[in-house]
Every structure is written in structure tokens, then in C-alpha cells.
Image (spheres, coloured by chain):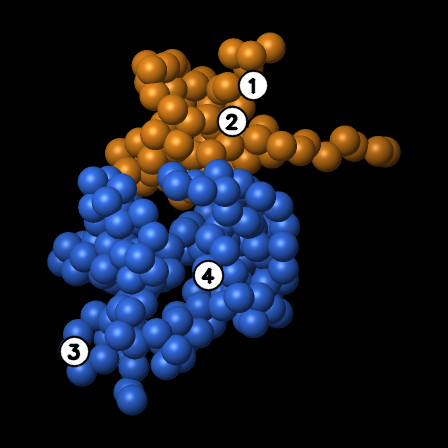
Chain colours: A orange, B blue
Amino acid sequence: MATEKVKGPPSYFPSIEKTYGKPISYWLTLIDTMKERKHMEMVSMLKSDHGMGHGHANALVAYHRSQKAA
Amino acid sequence: MAVFIREAHAGDRDALGALKLQSSLAWGDHAEELRALPQAREIPVAHLPHAIVAELDGEIVGFATVLAGRDAMQAELEDLFVAPQLWQTGIGRKLLAEAEHRAATRGARTLHVVAGERARPFYEASGYRFAGTTATDFEPAVELLKYLP
């Protein structure tokens, strides 16, 4: 059976939920509250305030931006 | 030169932050922005359990942090800094080798790192290959990866 491999930011989601113990919706809501910030400022806040690594923080912000742009 | 690698503990946080800023400033790029940026001198508390430090004569002279990556098969090298006066002495290589060992022990098959162009040769000489581009606070950077033995 062929399964499609998840690519792009959502490919990080299972690891993000497992690592920080909160659903993706929690993080997207949190990013909503940062809407005046630039992309890298959001990434920095997720890293410094919530202990994320660059990859996880960047994936969440990139996904959030793509959803808003759609 | 006897360099000792150990796990970081909470009391190291200030020293690691200072080392991170000192090392970042040593290139001479973005000095004003780095000094103004709180995260340039701070290590998130949650990263400390995932950090290892290099000590020389009881002084912390470098550190590396390995975090979870995209999935269980990947790990991410979040930080790797060495005191500038000790660059090119093998401390970075030693930290990198230990970081790779720890990532592999946790089940990761690849270690990823986001590096600026200045750091890129160091990683490429250690077997890392281009995997994509990404953004950082100041400039575009490259993502590099290495398949772990």
C-alpha cells in the first residue's frame, strides 16, 4: 500500500506534539497573539520562551503564515 | 590540552550565554544587533538538559546542544559554540563528535544544523552536506545534515 510521505512544516508536527506535550492548535493560537511580530521574532520567542529548537519553531511559524496566506 | 566533556547543569546557564555572545561577536558581523538581542546571550532553560559543555582547566570553553528534530529519525544541533581564543584547537570537533554520538544513541539517523556561511566549512569538513536554505535572525543560512554511523 502506498502512503504519501508528509512534507514541509506539517512533517514536524508529531515530533513537536511529543516533545512539548501540547497540540499544534495550542501553538498556532499562541502565534496568533504574536501577529505584529516578524517571522524571525516569532521563531525567537518560541525558542527563548518555550525552549523550542530552531527547526520546530520555524516549522510552526512557517505553517501559521501559510495558513493565513491561503 | 586536556578537554573534558560533561553534561550541562542549571548553574552553567549564565556562562553558556556569555560564551554564546562572545563567540557570535568574534566574527565582527552584526555586533550592534547581537548586543541588542536578548536571545544572543541567553540559553533557554529547557535546552540545558540537552547541552554538553567542554571544560579546560575547570573553565567552560565550549558547549553544544542537541534537540529533537523533525521526527525520531532526526536530531537537531541547536547550538555549538567555542571560546574564540580556542578556535582551531579541536574543541569544536570534539563537541560535535560527542553531539553526534548522543543523537545516534537516541535513535537519530541524521543530525541537522543551521549554519551561517562562515561556519559552513567547519561542518562540511566534518562530513555535513547541504540540505536546504533557511532564515535566521540576520541573514539566510544553510541547513546541513550528516548521516550518523
Taking the image as shown, residue A51 lies to the left or right of residue B134, namely left
Mark 2 to mark 3 CA distance (whole Å): 42 Å
The disc placed on residue B54 is none
- Residue B16 vertical placement versus A22 (above, below): below
| Amino acid tagged 2 | Ala
Residue B28 spot, x, y in % from top left: 31, 57
Bin the neighbour count of mark 2 within 10 Å (Cα to Cα): few under 14, some 14-19, many 20 and up: some
Q: Tell if the residue under mark 2 belongs to the same chain as the one under mark 3.
A: no
- Chain letter for the residue marked with disc 1 in the picture: A
Q: Tell if the residue under mark 3 belongs to the same chain as the one under mark 1.
A: no
Indicate which label's residue lies in the foreground, 2 or 4. 4
Mark 3 to mark 1 CA distance (whole Å): 48 Å
Mark 4 to mark 3 CA distance (whole Å): 26 Å
Taking the image as shown, residue B105 lies to the left or right of residue B60, namely right
Mark 4 to mark 1 CA distance (whole Å): 30 Å
| Image point (43%, 34%), residue name | A57
Mark 1 to mark 2 CA distance (whole Å): 6 Å
The residue carrying mark 2 is A62
Task: Say whether residue B116 is visible.
Answer: yes
- Say if mark 2 contacts mark 3, CB within 8 Å: no
- Residue A16 vertical placement versus B21 (above, below): above
Taking the image as shown, residue B112 lies to the left or right of residue B10, namely right
The disc placed on residue A66 is 1
* Count of numbered circles on the image: 4
| Amino acid tagged 4 | Ala
The disc placed on residue B58 is 3
- Say if mark 4 contacts mark 3, CB within 8 Å: no
- Chain letter for the residue marked with disc 4 in the picture: B
The disc placed on residue B119 is 4
